[in-house]
């Protein structure tokens, strides 16, 4: 099981304050014989739709010297988690939680604006 990122509790507490219930603090994504480990599984009841919304959140700190290298690794992990969820839990949404400053830095790069598969609307910024 991977170690928690330094912002793990910050993101978890922000979700709780926003009305989310944490169902798993370290969530195992399983498909066939493989396991991956995301940071959180959370649920929120949507009254208008009379159903529960579940999200999987992967938290990244981006503390290494190269933010682009960290982004490359985080994006690869995100895409792999997304594919696992498509096979096992199609109704779960996946979010990558990163600091606002990292999000703004990554978005300022040309590589991000030219990529069609970058999940820019699936970031949870704190």
Image (cartoon, helix red, strand yellow):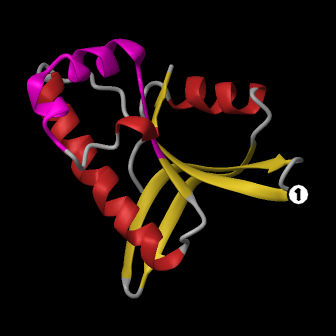
Would residue 4 be visible to someone looking at this image?
no
Q: Is residue 22 above or below residue 35?
A: above
Horizontal relation, residue 50 to residue 101: left or right: right
**x, y percentage for residue 57?**
51, 45
**Farthest bottom residue?**
32
**x, y percentage for residue 47?**
89, 47
**x, y percentage for residue 68?**
13, 28
Horizontal relation, residue 57 to residue 121: left or right: right
Instruction: Name the residue rendered at 51%, 65% in the picture.
Output: 28
Instruction: Name the residue rendered at 18%, 30% in the picture.
Output: 113
Q: Is residue 34 above or below residue 112?
A: below
Q: Is residue 16 magenta?
A: no
Q: Is residue 107 above or below residue 38?
A: above
Q: Quadrant of residue 112?
A: top left
**x, y percentage for residue 55?**
60, 51
**Farthest top residue?**
101
Would residue 55 be visible to someone looking at this image?
yes
Q: Is residue 111 magenta?
A: yes
Q: Magenta segment, which residues?
A: 95-115
Q: Please, what secondary structure does the residue beneath circle 1 have?
A: loop
Q: Is residue 77 above or below residue 107?
A: below
Residue position for label 1: 50
Horizontal relation, residue 95 to residue 50: left or right: left
Q: Is residue 23 or residue 78 the one in the foreground?
A: 78
Instruction: Name the residue rendered at 39%, 61% in the picture.
Output: 82
Q: Is residue 111 or residue 35 the one in the foreground?
A: 111
């Amino acid at each position: 099981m991977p170690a928690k990122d330094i912002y793990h509790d910050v993101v978890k507490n922000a979700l709780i304050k926003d009305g989310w219930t944490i169902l798993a603090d370290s969530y195992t994504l399983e498909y066939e014989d493989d396991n991956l480990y995301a940071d959180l599984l959370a649920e929120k009841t949507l009254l208008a739709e009379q159903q529960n919304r579940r999200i999987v959140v992967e938290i990244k700190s981006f503390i290494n010297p190269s933010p682009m290298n960290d982004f490359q690794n985080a994006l690869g992990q995100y895409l792999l988690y997304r594919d696992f969820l498509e096979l096992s839990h199609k109704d779960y949404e996946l979010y990558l939680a990163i600091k606002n400053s990292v999000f703004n830095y990554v978005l300022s790069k040309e590589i991000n604006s030219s990529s069609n598969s970058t999940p820019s609307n699936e970031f949870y910024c704190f």
